[in-house]
Image (tube, rainbow, N blue to C red):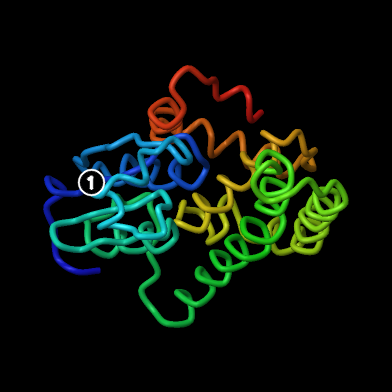
Amino acid sequence: MSGPASGDDVVLWGAGTMRTHRTLWLARELAIDYQHRPIGSRTGETMTPEFLELNPRHKIPVMTHGDLVLTESAVILNYLTEAFPVPDNFFVPDDPATRAKMFEWCFFTMTELDANALYTMRRHGDLKDIYGDAPEAVRAGEAYFHHQIDAMEGRIRGAGAFLMGERISIADILFTSCLDWARFYKLALPDYLSAYQARLGDRPAYRESFAENYPGRSVEEVR
């Protein structure tokens, strides 16, 4: 991890999605004094000249830190843990092998669960007016989510209290956000994952960032 950096000029753009929640949650875990611009997807707010200069793909979340602009939630999380001090109860790997194991969890979550399973369901369910109504694709996405979770049960159970042992890491934030997403879609989770999700969801930083990301919504919606 690099030396201490100032959070005074960290700006987190975006609200209302699981992906934006990740960045707000971690910033609160690390006690970063960030600014929040709670713009939403498909509201016109991501199409302004100001925002398109940051991300011409008009996607959220986006983080700016001084002159640095980052546009992918997983990358934002990794950057924040390297650029800012972390508390003793937060895990950051300090050797190549352990770092690779953490990134394995991150890439599994981002590719197999987020992009492949859950976003397929969103693309052809909630966003069917844009991408086309495809009920079979939605069912396949749900089945794929369950298949991936079931295949990883042994590794998840054997990991410890968190995916990297006894301390929370960015892998847990990414993974929990996908479990929340699944519960928004009314997907059943096995008991051991429901307990894990509830334990992560009881963290003060989680609850505070949830309220910031989803004004007017209750954490109980994902329980």
Quadrant where the N terminus sits is bottom left
Judging depth in this view, the residue of 148 and 92 nearest the camera is 148
Judging depth in this view, the residue of 177 and 101 nearest the camera is 177
Q: Residue at x 45, y 74 (%)?
A: 99
Residue 160: percent from the left, percent from the top? 60, 55
What kind of residue is marked 1?
Val
CA neighbours of label 1 inside 10 A, class few (<14), some (14 to 19), many (20+): some
In the image, taking residue 178 as reference, residue 90 lies left or right, namely: left
| 194 relative to 70, above or below | above
Residue 103: percent from the left, percent from the top? 50, 70
Judging depth in this view, the residue of 129 and 191 nearest the camera is 129
Q: Quadrant of residue 198?
A: top right
Residue 222: percent from the left, percent from the top? 63, 30
Q: Secondary structure at mark 1?
A: strand
Q: Residue at x 31, y 63 (%)?
A: 79
Residue that label 1 marks: 11
In the image, taking residue 28 as reference, residue 171 lies left or right, namely: right
| 148 relative to 207, above or below | below
